[in-house]
Image (spheres, rainbow, N blue to C red):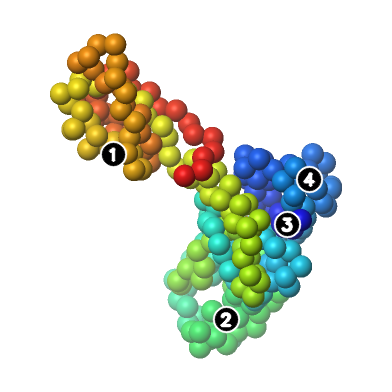
Amino acid sequence: MLRVAVPNKGALAERASEMLREAGYRQRNEQRDLTVIDSANDVEFFFLRPKDIAIYVGSGRLDLGITGLDLMRDSGANVEPRLSLGFGGSTFRYAGPRGTDWQLADIKGKRLATAYKTLVQADLEKHGIEAEIIRLDGAVEISIQLGVADLIADVVGSGRTLQQHDLVPFGHTICESEAVLIHSAAVEDSAAKQQLTARLQGVVFAQHYLMLDYDCPRSLLDEALRVTPGLESPTVAPLADPAQVAVRAMVPRKDANQLMDELSALGAKAILASDIRFCRL
Ligand SMILES: Nc1ncnc2c1ncn2[C@@H]1O[C@H](COP(=O)(O)OP(=O)(O)OP(=O)(O)O)[C@@H](O)[C@H]1O
Ligand SMILES: O=P(O)(O)OC[C@H]1O[C@H](OP(=O)(O)OP(=O)(O)O)[C@H](O)[C@@H]1O
Ligand SMILES: [Mg+2]
């Protein structure tokens, strides 16, 4: 049975379970359950703290896991990302009190609070900076106000939490992160791991694409197909009116409105966009 780790709480938990559901897997109904067996798909899911997931997967006890790239790197475990899941995007940044034009070199000799000690230590070493790292578990932005640190390094999503605490990010981005599916770098791949990956890939892909349907004069078909070339070859079907054809093609979601404008200007009619829930390419 394939064994898969899923975040049990925090920023990634809900979306991770939602994606697995979309991919056809059974997920927990009760927030406090720590495991769920999906016997139809021969998978057991383990609901673990996001910070611990890379450690379990790196140990080889679990086959796959969903976690943040920043957490994966901080764990130091022997794991690799195998699929980006397209949610939980954040950056990991140094930050200090507003009003000072902080530079990276200013970190030297300061007390720097973080919940990602390994990640920060590696970055400081890389830049030849020595500082006292204060290891906290969370709510790191409050630590300066409470007098235990001078600077912090933490996850920035919208930037709201930094702003609320009068902090500004400075220096380079330590890590760009998003939710990823990970595996152990030391364990061989298997058909079961590949199948779960392909199912999640289908969900990620479906989120990035829309299906466009439209009718277009046969005389304009070549031009219309240049606008919507599809992934490989769009479907072109005859209509009752021999001068018209119906076209169906997948398009990137972010371009959909512009492409619909172009098709409309070209003379296409009845242009419909529909969601793709999941797919296998
Ligand atoms: N506001 C946010 N926006 C986007 N991603 C975020 C945000 N906060 C956390 N993350 C991402 O979520 C992951 C960490 O999750 P979270 O902070 O929920 O876990 P945790 O800190 O281990 O648990 P907890 O906060 O419950 O102690 C990291 O990969 C991080 O980049
Ligand atoms: O830039 P923002 O959108 O404001 O998000 C960033 C905040 O979100 C996370 O906190 P979380 O809710 O996980 O609490 P924690 O600090 O206890 O981990 C992160 O640690 C930051 O504090
Ligand atoms: Mg957190």
Residue 128 vertical position relative to residue 50 in the rendered view, above or below: below
Neighbourhood count class around disc 2 (C-alpha, 10 Å): few under 14, some 14–19, many 20 upward = few
Label 3 residue near ligand 1, CB within 8 Å: no
Where in the figure is residue 233, as x and y percent of width and height? Answer: 32, 39
Q: Residue furthest top?
A: 240
**In the depicted view, which residue is nearer to us: 94 or 179?**
179
Tell me: 60 left or right of 188: right
Query: Which amino acid is tagged 2?
Result: Ala
- Please say if 92 is above or below 119: above
Task: Name the residue tied to disc 4.
Answer: 39
Amino acid type, callout 4: Ser
Q: What residue is shown with label 2?
A: 122
- Indicate whether 279 appears above or below 9: above
The residue under the point 55% across, 43% down is 203
Q: CA distance from mark 1 to mark 4?
A: 41 Å
The structure residue drawn at horizontal position 20% and vertical position 20%, both measured from the top left corner, is: 217
What residue did someone put label 1 on? 229
